[in-house]
Image (tube, rainbow, N blue to C red):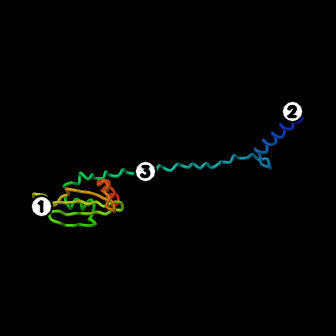
Amino acid sequence: MSPAFFRLSVFALGLLATACTATPDGAPVEPVATATTVVKAAPPPPTPKPEPPLPTLASLFDASPAALNGLLGAPSLKRIEPPAELWQYRGTSCVLALYLYEKPKGGAHALTHAEAHDGRGKRVETETCLHALLREKS
């Protein structure tokens, strides 16, 4: 680098430094405050509460008609043929048939048998059908 170029570079840097610290009338430049925006991250969504466990089919045996009505609602079909009653619940994926028989003592009906099938008569897992109906209802 030639000495003339070096001196010219130093002079130009000096002018630039002076230009940044003074206004055209020679008054010193006040530093400008810059705005800083702080963006807080959104809180994570709340963790959904786990669904309460669905009742098992075994827990429904010996259930009264009132208990079944409370859990599943009114049946789609109810056929009474003493000493039994057939309660049928239709869902989008299956049909659940509940058989209630009179108890030997007291004459009240209770669930004693259950079976399930798809809409065309093919047998399906009874407890799976029960759970599907309960999910559809909620």
Closer to viewer: mark 1 or mark 3 = 1
Location of residue 65 in the rendering, given as x and y in whole percent from the top left corner = 20, 61
Find numbered disc 3 in the image and state the secondary structure of the residue it sits on: loop
| Earlier-in-chain disc, 1 versus 3 | 3
Closer to viewer: mark 3 or mark 2 = 3
| Earlier-in-chain disc, 2 versus 1 | 2
- Residues under numbered marks 3 and 2 in contact, where contact means CB atoms less than 8 Å apart: no
Query: What residue is shown with label 1?
Result: 107
Amino acid type, mark 2: Met
Considering every residue shown, the one lying at the far left of the view is 105
Find numbered disc 1 in the image and state the secondary structure of the residue it sits on: loop
Location of residue 64 in the rendering, given as x and y in whole percent from the top left corner = 19, 59
Location of residue 120 in the rendering, given as x and y in whole percent from the top left corner = 33, 62
Location of residue 19 in the rendering, given as x and y in whole percent from the top left corner = 79, 45
Find numbered disc 2 in the image and state the secondary structure of the residue it sits on: loop
| Rendered view: 71 above or below 42 | below
Query: What residue is shown with label 2?
Result: 1
How many residues crowd mark 3 within 10 Å: few (<14), some (14–19), many (20+)? few
- Which residue is found at the position 32% from the left and 58% from the top? 122
How many residues crowd mark 1 within 10 Å: few (<14), some (14–19), many (20+)? few
Amino acid type, mark 1: Gly
Q: What's the distance in space between the residues labelled 3 and 2, CA to CA?
A: 66 Å
Q: Quadrant of residue 91?
A: bottom left
| Rendered view: 84 above or below 60 | below
- Which residue is found at the position 77% from the left and 46% from the top? 22
Query: What residue is shown with label 3?
Result: 46
Q: What's the distance in space between the residues labelled 1 and 3, CA to CA?
A: 50 Å
- Residues under numbered marks 2 and 1 in contact, where contact means CB atoms less than 8 Å apart: no
| Rendered view: 116 above or below 14 | below
How many residues crowd mark 2 within 10 Å: few (<14), some (14–19), many (20+)? few
